Structure formats: structure tokens, C-alpha cells
Image (cartoon, rainbow, N blue to C red):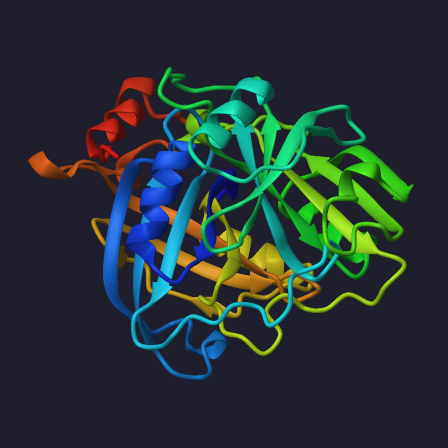
Amino acid sequence: MEKIIYGIQQLGVGVSDAVAGFQWYGRMLGADVKVFDDSNEATYMAPYMGGSPHRKHAILAANLQGGSCCEIWQFMDRTPQAPKEEISIGDLGIYAAKIKAKNIHEAHKDIKRKGGIVSDILQNPDKQSFFYMDDLHGNKLQVIESYEWFKPNKRHATGGVCGCIIGVSDVEQSRKLYSDVLGYDMAVYDETGVFADFAPLKGGEGKFRRVLLTHSKERRGSMAALLGRSRIELVQALSETPCKIFEGRYWGDIGFIHLCFDIHGMETLKAECAAAGFPFTVESDHAFKMGEAAGHWSYLEDPDGTLIEFVETKKIPLAKKWRWYLNLEKRDPHKPLPRWMIAALGMNRVKM
């Protein structure tokens, strides 16, 4: 079976209150479509949760203007642990989510008006304008100007996730996964030095190598039109020895817990990842239920232990109120879903 990567499906966000987290991402950033709302026991991820299953509450939140979702994830039987110290840029793991903005100045004003605390507007080495902000749990966001949209509206100045910043210990080793396996084969820039746009961040005054990666091939099929083009920025600290962001903590604790890709052909991907030196460490059964959705999912670790998830989606709820579900197993995996069908997810929008 052919391997197809449709795009980043979602970024996992560990929070202390999933309901408050969903309300914040919906009100502040427009991720107000609840794709699923799942409360049960997380069993498969026990190896990353101290060796035991734990009860959890997870909400998959989408912004139908375009971009990937956020999976807002909360422990229900233990107190989620925050990092003991503020995370530094270059620390190992997912440092920040990249969030799409239609106009960076309008987004900056809109989020300030809503009470968000934002940095000044900056530029990266590619001359893209952006600003930093934190969510209500202290997770770092980079709101960055984008020109690719699925279904723009006037309610919000921002879209969904369009990538992330990942701290790595060795860019070349990390590219064996992100470029060779996941298809981020094109470097928008690869620069080493001290960067003005890192100055507002803890540890940002040091020397870094940073590589912004994107995919030369357009993502096609399934929900690729909504998920859109994405970029992964690998940041290697050269002045300091980086710490692991989740050192001494569980998957699911506060922070960005995983980067998830929407895919087709799990068995082919599994073999390819193993051959490249990145074997799956966790894998569900073939019809795992995620609230109202269903799929087959797996995890692997990048060279620094950052968790990458793959989901082969089997069923998604288009309109839960009318029990309208889409079975993806019976569709041609190369054929994109009709835009009206993806837009129908908007019937699961929650008014904030």
C-alpha cells in the first residue's frame, strides 16, 4: 500500500484544563470547531506516562479558515506538571506552534484587543513577519503571516497551525527523519549566528543554527486542502547545552506533547520508518475510537526523543447532531474530499 502524507493533522497541547484550553483557542485564535471530545483512559501511551494508563480529556479543535488542528489534552487523574523552569529556545522538543495570520498587523491588534500578551512584530530570516505570544498555560505560539487559506471569514484574524519550532541537538541527524521520511526536503533558509528575532526569548541571545524546512511536493488527497502547506523549523543551540523539554515529566503534561501527521498507508510507513532507524514505539489497533472519530495511529521518536504521531483516519464526524459521519476507508486515498464536505465540519462549531 502506498504511503501518503496529507499534512500535519494536529499539534498536541498538554494543558491543566481542557475545557478552558478549548475556550481560549476558540475565542483567541478561532479554533472553535470541535472535531471530537474524548474522555476515557489512555492505555497505549503508558510507556510515556510512568508505565501506567491514565484517564484523560482530549478535544480536537479546528479552525476552518485553514491550517491544522490542536489536540487539547488534559490528565484527569493527576495534576499536569509544568516545566520546573522556563523553556529556552533550542531546548530539545517542540518549542512553539506556528499559527497562520492573514494580516500580521490586524492579528496583532485583534489578539491584544482580546487580552492576549504579545511581543513586538518581528521578522525571521525569510523576511516573514510574526509575533510571539503564550497561550493561557504558557505554551509558546509564533503567529506568522500566511497567504494560503481554505475558507476565510471575518470573525478571526488567525487560522490554524501551520508548523512548529523544534529544538534539536544535531540538525543533520534530525533531517534524516523530517526531510527524508516526512518529506520536508526543501530548506527555505539554513543560517548560523545570533538572531534578532530570538532576542525576546529565554536563551535567545546565544548562537544557533536554524533551518526552516518545507515540502517541495504539494500535499494532496483527503483533507490536504484544509491542512495546507506547513513548515518545520529546526533550531540547534550552539552556545549552551540544551535541556529536554519533557525531562522528568510525562507525555500529556503541560507543553507541546506531539506533532501528528494525517497519513494513508500505515504499514508501508511503518516499514519505511524502521528502515530509516525510527521504529514505531507505540501503535494502536486498526479501529481505535477517538471520541466520535476513529482511526489507526502510531508514534515514533525523533533523534532527541520528540514524539511524532501518525493517524490513518477511518471516520470523522461531519455533523454529530444529525449523526452524519464520513467513512474514509471507502474513498480513493488520492482524491481530495470535496471542499463543501470539509466545510461541513463547521456544523460542529462552538459559539464562544
x 44%, y 24%: residue: 225
Count of numbered tags: 0
Viewport quadrant of the C terminus: top left
Q: Position of residue 112 (x, y in %)?
A: 50, 31
Tell me where residue 93 sits by quadrant: bottom right
Whether residue 76 can be seen here: yes
Whether residue 177 can be seen here: no
x 36%, y 63%: residue: 74
Q: Is 204 on the left-hand or right-hand side of 119?
A: right
x 47%, y 55%: residue: 137
Q: Position of residue 70 (x, y in %)?
A: 42, 45
Answer above or below: position of 279 versus 67: below
Q: Position of residue 341 (x, y in %)?
A: 26, 24
Q: Position of residue 18 (x, y in %)?
A: 33, 56
- Camera-side residue of 14 and 197: 197
x 71%, y 46%: residue: 180
Q: Is 153 on the left-hand or right-hand side of 203?
A: left
Answer above or below: position of 352 versus 179: above
Q: Is 68 on the left-hand or right-hand side of 285?
A: right
